Image (tube, grey):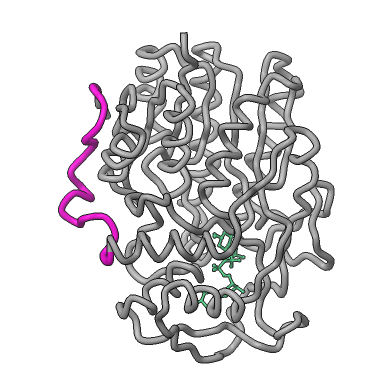
Amino acid sequence: MPETVLVTGGAGFIGSHTCVELLDHGYEVVTVDNYVNSSPQALDRVAKIARRPLTAAYDVDVRDRKALSEVFASHPVDAVIHFAAHKAVGESVSLPTEYYDTNVGGTCALLSVMREHRVHRLVFSSSCSVYGDAETVPLTEDSPVAPTNPYACTKLMCEHILQDVCARLSEMKVLALRYFNPVGAHPSGLLGEAPRGIPNNLMPYVAQVAVGRREKLSVFGDDYPTPDGTGVRDYIHVMDVAEGHRVAVEHLDDHTGMQVFNLGTGTGTSVLQLISAFSEVSRRPVPHQVVERRAGDVAALVADASAVATAWRWSTTRDLTAMCRDTWRFQELNPDGYSPDLVHAGPKTGELSCG
Ligand code: UD1
C-alpha cells in the first residue's frame, strides 16, 4: 500500500510543488486548502505535471476541526505536511490576531484532529524568520531565535507547541523545517509563485518588472554591511524545498520526538546579484532604483545547511541561474498568475470536497 500524505495548504506555492514531488514518488496525496491565498487551478496543474491525480482535494479551513476530522476519517493518513498559514510579514504587523488565529490556532486544531485519528507523523513548515536580526551568519539550528514580527512569532510559537506535545506524547514524530527564501518555479512553467496584488518579495517583483508589468524595482537600501551594500539572502529553489519535504517524510521515523532543520543552500546572494542574474537569464533589463531601507529588514540571512546534509545525506542541487530561469518561464507563460476566474471556483481536482 502506498503511503498517504495529507498536505495542508496544498494549493499554495510550496504546497503545490511538494504535491508534485510526492506524486512523482508514488505517494497518495490528499490536500486541504481554503484557497484564501491560493488557486485551485494550481492543483489541476499538479495533476497534469505528475500525470496522475491527487487522491482528493478538500476546500477546508484547518481550523474547522469537524471538517478536518471528516477528511482524516475518509483516508488512511500516514503523515501530514502542514503548510497552511498566513505568511506576509508586513501584513502580520497590522493583523496580528488573524495571524495567531490561523497559524497557531490552525496548528492546534490539526494536532488535536491528528490525535483523534491516531496520526503521529508531521512535517511542519517553519521559517528562518525565527532567527530575527541575526548577528552572525551562517545560521545553525542552534543559533539564537529572536523573532521580530508576529508572523515569525507564530512560527516559533508553533515550534514550541510541537516540542511540548512531543515531550508528552511519546508516539509523536515531528520535523520542523525552517526555510530560508524559497523562489523559482516548476521547470514546466505550469506551477509557480502567483502573488495577488503587489508582490512583497524580491523575486516575484523582479520577474514582474522584467516582463513589463511593473515599471521598476525599489532596492531597499545599499548601505548594509554586505559586499555590495544590499541585503543578502539564502535563496532556495522551490523544487529543492519540495524535495526536502519528501525526504523529510522518508526520515520521519529516524527519531522519536521533534527535530528542527534549516532548509537553505548555504549560499548568500545580494539584491544586486539577483537582479543581474535575472537580467542575464531573461535577457531583459530590470530597471531599479535604490531607496530607503525597508523597516524590519536585516543585512544578511544565510543558512548553515550541514545538518540536513548529515542527517539525510541530502542537499539542494539547483543554483541561482535555475531559480531565475524557472521563475522567468513561469512569469512568461503566466503573466497574470493563475486565471482570476478560477481563483474562487472551488476545488477542481479530486473526487471529494467538503467544507
Ligand atoms: C521575507 C520574510 C520571511 C519569509 C520570506 C518569504 C522578513 C523579515 N522575512 O524574507 O519570513 O519567509 O519573505 O520568501 O520579512 N527587497 C528589495 N526590493 C523589493 C523586495 C525586497 O530590495 O521590492 C530586498 C529586501 O530588502 C531583502 C531581499 O530583497 O534584502 C529579500 O526580500 P524578500 O524577498 O522580501 O524576503 P525577506 O525579507 O528576506
Left/right of residue 26 with respect to residue 39 in the rendered view: right
Left/right of residue 63 with respect to residue 36 in the rendered view: right
Asked whether residue 354 appears in the rendered view, the answer is no
In the picture as drawn, the residue positioned furthest to the left comes out as 341
Query: Quarter containing ligand 1?
Result: bottom right
Closest to the observer, 44 or 67 = 44
Relative height, residue 159 to residue 250 (above, below): below
Left/right of residue 103 with respect to residue 16 in the rendered view: right
Q: Which quadrant: the C terminus?
A: top left
Pinpoint residue 2: horizontal percent, then vertical percent: 47, 14
Pinpoint residue 318: horizontal percent, then vertical percent: 59, 53
Residue at screen point 68% across, 14% down: 171
Residue 33, by quadrant, is top left
| Chain part drawn in magenta | 335-352
In the picture as drawn, the residue positioned furthest to the top comes out as 1
Residue 128 is a magenta residue: no
Main SS class of the magenta portion in the image: loop
Residue at screen point 68% across, 72% down: 232
Closest to the observer, 347 or 132 = 347
